[in-house]
Structures are given as C-alpha cells and as structure tokens.
Amino acid sequence: EVRLVESGGGVVQPGGSLKLSCAASGFDFRDTGMRWFRQAFGKKLEWVSSISAGGGYLGYPDSVKGRFTISRDDAKNMLYLQMDNLRTEDTAMYYCAKDVAGSERGQGTQVTVSL
C-alpha cells in the first residue's frame, strides 16, 4: 500500500521559513520521481516542485523559484521542501505526491503565512 505522510506545516510570519517533510512507504521510493503540490482554500491544486529519481533534476514554477528547495533522502525514504522568504500567498495545504497529476498524494500539512 502506497503511503505518503506530510509534516512540518505551521503558522509563520511573512519572510519566515518552514521545512516540510514527507515520509514515503509502499513503493520503490528510490526509483520514483516525487513532487510537492499545494492547494489554497477555494483554488485548484498547484504544482510546487519536482525532483527526479536520484535527485539530478529539480523543477519549480516561477512563483516559488529561488525561495523553495526540494530534496530527498533515499536512505530514509524521505522527501523535503525547504521554504524560505514565505509570502502570504504561499498559504495553502501542502501535499507530496508520486505522480505528475498529484492524485497519489498524502493527507497534507497546512502552511499559514500571516502577520
């Protein structure tokens, strides 16, 4: 059974940082490209970052490029998202996913950026 469990969300002021974690199990994590998505209240699911199997390729949309960093630890089956210089518009539920569409994702972790 595929299982993805996100953690690390919270409330932070604009300009602050958070590091999200995703524990993966039930599939060959080392050979799987992984992604982070987010969904703000009332909005569509938005792709946030991608990392290839082996970590050689990293991808980000312009909205987070230079502020977010995706990484992985294959020995621990863990995926991470370091988020710096957070903005109010980054407020959303954040999900890790193993597919391109984001349909195979965990339960999410809430990130709230507010004064």
Image (cartoon, rainbow, N blue to C red):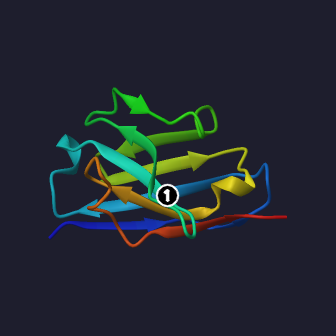
- Residue to which mark 1 is pinned: 38
Name the side, left or right, on which 79 lies relative to 86: left
- Element under label 1? strand
Q: Quadrant of the C terminus?
A: bottom right
User: In which quadrant of the rendered view does residue 90 lie?
Assistant: bottom right
User: Of 21 and 75, which appears nearest the observer?
Assistant: 21
Q: Quadrant of the N terminus?
A: bottom left
Counting from the top left corner in percent of width and height, residue 53 is at 25, 37
Counting from the top left corner in percent of width and height, residue 42 is at 55, 69
Is the residue 99 above or below the residue 51 in the image? below
Residue at the (34%, 33%) spot, across then down: 55
Counting from the top left corner in percent of width and height, residue 101 is at 29, 52
Residue at the (18%, 41%) spot, across then down: 31
Counting from the top left corner in percent of width and height, residue 96 is at 38, 57
Residue closest to the far top:
56
Residue at the (36%, 54%) spot, across then down: 78
Is the residue 115 above or below the residue 63 in the image? below
Circle 1 Cα neighbour tier, 10 Å, few/some/many (<14 / 14–19 / ≥20): many
Residue at the (69%, 51%) spot, across then down: 17
